Amino acid sequence: MELSSPDRAARAALRFPLPGQPRVLGPLSGGLIHETWLVEAGTTRWVLQRLNRNVFRDVDAVMRNFSAVVEHLGRCTTSLGLSEPQRRALALVPARDGRSWTEDDAGGAWRCTGYIAHTETKLRAASPADAREAGRAFGEYTRLMEGFTAPLAMTIPGFHHTGGRLEALERTAERDPVGRAASVAAELEVVDEFRALAHVLSPLMAAGGIPTRPAHNDAKIANLLFDDTTGRSLAVIDLDTVMPGSALHDVGDLIRTTVGSAEEDGPDARTMQVRPEYFAALIEGWFAGAEGVLTADERELTLTAGRILTFEQAVRFLTDHLEGDHYYPVSRPDHNLHRAQAQLALLIDLTERSEALEEIIAAS
Ligand code: GN1
Ligand code: MG
């Protein structure tokens, strides 16, 4: 999706009943799928997003899910008496026509939420404390969502169907639409070595071996808002993939995004390694946040889930590289390949250290 001009964002902002003339302060970075802008109107700031309609085909369904989840989390915050409830939940600003989102002349789908002041997002954990807090926040999300009963639309069918993701990669490698398959033979071989990981979670869920939950499905540290003075996570954001899923998808994504030594796409990505002290902190936070909710099997499969989600993300990045970079935005040659290589390096290290990491889990 091409970045809109600030002018287009400013025109979109006019479609919402903000107090006074909105000013676009600039893009908010971090997400790969939507486009996000910080807007000021009067003395208050707002977040304006253009949703990626190639990825999310049914915007109404996305927004129904979004509203139901935000309402539920807001109710939990109030009934549990958590501090600063107004800073813990995203507040949707309906468009002037009363709808939850609005369409611009070029077909862009825009929504607006309140900006929670004095918060920051983190692309990766900079300390074990960050990892612990990320685990705690998503664990708490899992716990609070136990009481969520509203129906949820499947906004992206097969999102964490790892087997389907692997098949897609293999089909694309076969078709080789942009002639890159030969140059990634080594990566395809590593993927093949780990292919058993593609057939663990979906069959288990289908057989009822692990509970289906209203999972977040994109539980990366970048999808949390942290208080910029206390370092506590206040709110879970990016709720567009909340769908029936598994807590293991969420803890798996947390492992994938917090314990690695390198950024998802940084220059040193191929040397990506596990940071065991971050892993220990993450697991401690996750089990504490989700206390009383996880089944024995869900606890047992924690590390396996981390390996599966890392594998799945490698497969998705590699598929997009072979497709010619249509899904994830790229800003340099082989960007998606480097992302895939980083995930594979992490997967290999998670696997090599399995014994030590399983001990950490057993001791938590
Ligand atoms: C995307 O939009 P963002 O950056 O929060 C993607 C996730 C991937 C992630 C990789 C809808 O999330 O599934 O894990 O990039 N979201 C979608 O960083 O595909
Ligand atoms: Mg995001």
Image: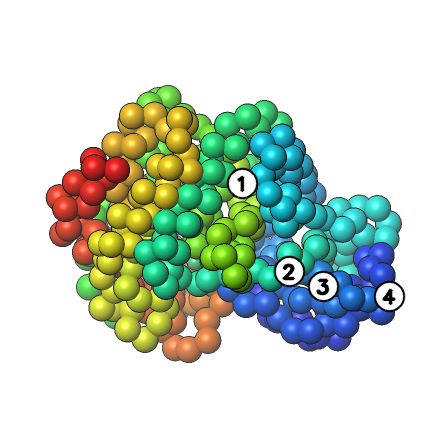
Gap in Å between the C-alphas at discs 4 and 3? 11 Å
Q: Secondary structure at mark 4?
A: loop
Q: Quadrant of residue 138?
A: top left
To which residue does mark 3 refer? 45
| Camera-nearest label, 3 or 2 | 2
Q: Position of residue 282 (x, y in %)?
A: 33, 48
Residue 353 marker: none
- In front here: 54 or 90? 90
Q: Nearer the viewer, residue 75 or 175?
A: 75
- Distance from mark 1 CB to nearest ligand 1 atom below 8 Å: no
Q: If you read the primary sequence from the N terminus, does the residue marked by circle 3 or circle 1 appear first?
A: 3
Q: Which secondary structure, mark 1?
A: loop
Residue with the mark numbered 1: 242
Q: Is residue 87 left or right of residue 288?
A: right
Q: Secondary structure at mark 2?
A: loop
| Residue at the disc numbered 2 | 117
Camera-nearest label, 1 or 2: 2
Q: Which residue is mark 4?
A: 20
**The disc labelled 1 sits on which kind of residue?**
Val
Distance, label 1 to label 4, CA atoms, is: 33 Å
Residue type, numbered disc 4: Gly
How packed mark 2 is, by other alpha carbons closer than 10 Å (few <14, some 14-19, many 20 or more), is few
Please give the name of the residue rendered at 46% of the width and 62% of the height, measured from the top-left corner: 122
